Amino acid sequence: MTINVGDKIPSVGLATMGAEGPEGISTDDIFSGKKVVIFGLPGAFTPTCSAKHLPGFVEHADAINAKGVDTIACISVNDAFVMGAWGKDQNVGDNVMMLADGSADFAEATDLVLDLTARGMGIRSQRFSMLVDDGVVKSVNVDEGTFEKTSAEQMLSDL
Ligand code: BEZ
């Protein structure tokens, strides 16, 4: 079952890119006691994700935080090296936490897998956005063909 409003975020291990290399981080570390906007996408450096999805959250980060959000996180089935490089390329700074779901554990546990094997991209994440308060899902939007539903602008107007 796809993760839904009222569900608890599953406990899985993820990674971020630190100064010395990849660093492990758990979903418990990220979500406990915090209001978090998390958005997922099929891949770093892919056209829609690079041109629209991630830049929207960077642009609107201050406005989203001003609504009481502690953390904005971007998650993708890529390794921490790629997510770190993409974050630098997109000048995310401290505005967006770049999370590597390298083995698709989060995508699998939330039933948000996107199978792009036929396109040579393997198992990825669907495009989605969620508002999570202290580990409990308050809203979830999954892309059904239009990127806008999961955009920063939509999240901002829903907050
Ligand atoms: C994108 O543009 O975001 C995209 C392109 C190909 C596969 C997945 C995502």
Image: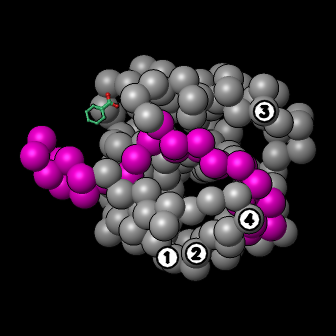
Where residue 30 appears, as percent x and y from the top left, is 67, 66
10 sits left or right of 122 in the view: right
Instruction: Give the mark, 4 or 1, whose residue is nearer the N terminus.
Output: 4
Instruction: Give the mark, 3 or 2, whose residue is nearer the N terminus.
Output: 2
Secondary structure under the numbered disc 2 in the rendered image: loop
Q: Main secondary structure of the magenta part?
A: strand
Where residue 82 appears, as percent x and y from the top left, is 34, 49
* In magenta segment, residue 35: no
Distance (Cα) linking label 1 and label 2: 10 Å
Distance (Cα) linking label 3 and label 2: 24 Å
Q: Residue 13: which disc?
A: 1
Secondary structure under the numbered disc 3 in the rendered image: helix
Q: Which residues are magenta?
A: 115-143
Instruction: Give the mark, 4 or 3, whose residue is nearer the N terminus.
Output: 4
Q: Which residue is mark 2?
A: 10
| Residue type (three-letter) at the residue carrying disc 2 | Pro
**Front: mark 3 or 1:** 3
Distance (Cα) linking label 4 and label 3: 17 Å
Above/below status of 8 relative to 150: below
Where residue 57 appears, as percent x and y from the top left, is 62, 31
Secondary structure under the numbered disc 4 in the rendered image: loop
Task: Kindly identify the residue that appears in the image at 89 percent across and 44 percent down.
Answer: 68
| Residue type (three-letter) at the residue carrying disc 4 | Gly
Task: Kindly identify the residue that appears in the image at 51 percent across and 77 percent down.
Answer: 12
Farthest front residue in view: 1
Q: Which residue is mark 3?
A: 158
* In magenta segment, residue 118: yes
Above/below status of 148 relative to 96: above
Q: The C terminus lies in which quarter of the figure?
A: top right
Q: Which residue is mark 4?
A: 6
